[in-house]
Image: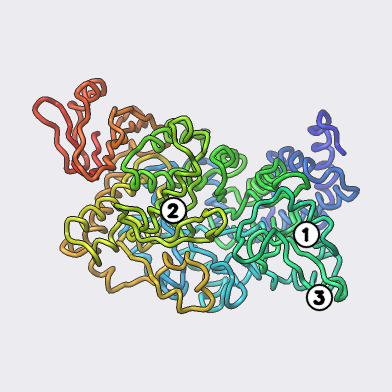
Amino acid sequence: MIERQNIEREAHRSLHRVLPRIEEMLRPEIKKDGQGWMQFTSRLHENFSRLFTLYADVYSDRYDFFFYLEDLIASIARLWFSRPQDLRELDIARESNPRWFESNQMLGAVCYVDLLAENLEGIRNRIPYFKELGITYLHLMPLFKAPEGENDGGYAVSSYRELNPTLGSMEELNSLASDFRKAGISLVLDLVFNHTSDEHLWAERAKAGDEEYMDFYRIFPSRELPDLYERNLREIFPDEHPGAFTFLPTLFNGRGGWVWTTFHSYQWDLNYSNPAVFNRMAEEMLFLANQGVEALRLDAVAFIWKQIGTNCENLPQAHALIKAFNAVARIAAPALTFKSEAIVHPDDVAKYISPEECQISYNPLLMALLWNSLATRKVRLLSQALAKRFKLKPGTAWVNYVRVHDDIGWTFSDEDASILGVNGYDHRRFLNEFYRGRFAGSFARGLPFQENPVTGDCRISGTCASLAGLEKALREEGENEVELAVRRILLIHGIILTAGGIPLIYLGDEIGALNDYTYRDDPAHERDSRWVHRPRADWEKCAKRNDPSCIEGRVYQGLQRLINLRKENQVFSGGELEVIRTENDHVLCYIRRYMGKRAIIFANFADSAQGIPLRICEQYSIHTKTILHGSSKMTDCNEITIDPLDFLVFG
C-alpha cells in the first residue's frame, strides 16, 4: 500500500524508472516518429501523477502493482504510435478549446445503423441529411460483433475490434469517421465496459477453465459469496433472472459455477479488481479512439465496482476507475470525450460529471420531468430540478434528450418531490398508468417495460410521438388533438434545444415516428418492449418533411425552426440558466445568459392559454425584448397570455 502523503514522490520515482524501460521496448517506433514521442512524453509527464494516484487508489495493495502499471504505460505508448496524424491534430485543437461542446452550434443525434440506413455505407449516404438537420454529433448505437438473437440491442459485445458484419467493417467505420469530420460531425460510440457477452474471447477462455481469464470476470464455485452480495443488490431485469448471478453448469470441470450478470445472463460483468481488466479495456478504448471516435458513451458506469455489504452501485472505486480511463485518454487521445450514462438518483448522476471524469452526461432527470410535466400539465418538479440540479462544473455539459433507445425511468428524487408535497411512489404509479394510456385523460400510447407484478413498478417504452399523443390523435381523435400532440413534441424539444448543453435528437422523432408494434413478430425482440420505439426508418415519410400540410412536415419544419433558433443565437451556448417563478403552475420560465446576451423562455404545458402577471413581465423587462419564437403575443399593456403548449422565446 502506498501512503497518501508519499503519492507525488512515488509517482515521480515510478515514471523515472518505467520510462527508460519503455523507451528501450519501443526504440524502433521512437526512431521512426521522434516528434510523436516528444508529444507523448510531454502529455505523459503532465498527466502521470494523476493516473498514478488513481491507479494506486484501486490497485496499490497488490504485490504486482508495478508490473501492471508498466504494462499499462507500454500499452498506451504503443497505441499512441498507431494514432493517425489527422487525429493528433484534432488532439491539439481540442486541447486548445476543451469546451468546444458547449457551443450553440452543437446538435446531437442518435440512431441504430441498421434501422436508419441498413449499414455504414448507408449512413455515409445520409450525411447530406444529417447536415440538413444541423447535426454535429452522431451517436451510432452498438455496432460491434455480438451474439445472434438476443444481445440487448448490441450491448452484449463479443469483440470491441470487430463490427457486426452485416453493418460493415472496422475499416469502413474508420473511413466513415473521417468523412464525418470533414462534414463537421463528431462520431460517438458506446464503450460497453461493465460487461462483455458470454461469446467474447475472454469469456470463452474463462469457460474453458483458463484461470487467467476466469479472473477477468466474477465467477464463483458456490453460492456462498453470491448470497452475501445479493443481500444488498437490487434486481435490474427480474423478468429474465432473479438476482445478479447466472449458473453455468460447465464451469469448474463440470461442477458448475455462478457468473455475475447484472443485466442479462449472456452479459458477464468484468472484474475490475483485476488490473489486467483495466489495462485491456484501456487498450480497447484507445483502439476505438484511433478509428476516429471522438466521444464514448460509458455504459452502465454505476455498476463497474463490486464490494460486499454495499449495493455495488456508484462506489468510490467506480469513480476512480473512470477518472483513470480519462487520464489515459488525456495522454494518448486527448480529443476523446467521455459521456456518462447513469440512470440513478440525481445526486449520484452529478458525481460522474467533471472535466477529470466524464465531461458530458446524459440528463435523465430532465427527460423524465419533461414527460412528467406533459402528463400533469404542471411544472413544479421541473422548475425545482432546473433550479436545484441543472448547474454543472465549468468545462462540462448535459446531454439533454427527449427520447433515446432505452425506456423511461422516473428518476426524480423522492426527497425533492416530498418538498412539494408529492409522494414519489404514488406519483410514479400515476405516471406509469398515464403513459400506458390507462389513466383518464391520458393522450399517451406507451408500453410497460420490466413490470414487477408484485410492486406494480415498471418503466415506459414508446416513441416521442406516441407518448406525446400523436398516435392516439391520428387513430382515435381529430385535428384538434393532432395539433396539440405536435405542439407537445415541439415544446419539449424546444426546452432541450435551449436549456444549455448538447441537445440530442433520437432520429425518427424529427418526423414524428410512431410506435412499431411489429417487434412482437421477432422472437429475439418480442419480450423486450423497448423495440416498440426502435422502428425502421421510413424514408418515404421522411421525403415529406418539407410539406407543411402533412404530419412529417409539421413536426420537421417546427423542429427546424427550433434548431435554427438555437444556432442563430449565441446566447444558447454554455450552460448558465436561471429559473424564474411565473406564479403559474403550468408555465415554466428560465433565463439563458452568455457573453452579455440574454434570452427569456416561457413554456406553457397546459392545453389552454395561460397568463403571466404583469409584474413579472416588468421585472425582467420583457417588453424591451423581441419575440424570437412562439405564437403568443404581448398585449398593449405589456402583459403576456401564452397560447396552449406554446414555446415562447424573447431575446
Eye-nearest disc, 2 or 1: 2
* Crowd rating for badge 1 (residues with CA inside 10 Å; few <14, some 14–19, many 20+): some
Q: Residue furthest right?
A: 63
Of residues 229 and 465, the one drawn nearer to the viewer in this rendering: 229
* Crowd rating for badge 2 (residues with CA inside 10 Å; few <14, some 14–19, many 20+): many
- Quadrant containing the C terminus is top left
**Residue 418 in view here:** yes
Q: Alpha-carbon distance for marks 2 and 1?
A: 35 Å
Q: Of the residues under marks 2 and 1, which one precedes in the sequence?
A: 1
Residue 12 has which mark?
none
* Crowd rating for badge 3 (residues with CA inside 10 Å; few <14, some 14–19, many 20+): few
Residue 213 on image: x %, y %:
81, 65
Amino acid on which disc 3 is placed: Thr
Residue 397 on image: x %, y %:
48, 41
Q: Secondary structure at mark 3?
A: loop
Q: Secondary structure at mark 1?
A: loop
Residue 432 has which mark?
2
> For mark 1, what is the residue?
218
Q: Residue visible at 25% across and 55% down? A: 486
Q: Alpha-carbon distance for marks 1 and 3?
A: 16 Å
Q: Against 459, is 124 above or below?
A: below
> For mark 3, what is the residue?
250
Amino acid on which disc 2 is placed: Asn
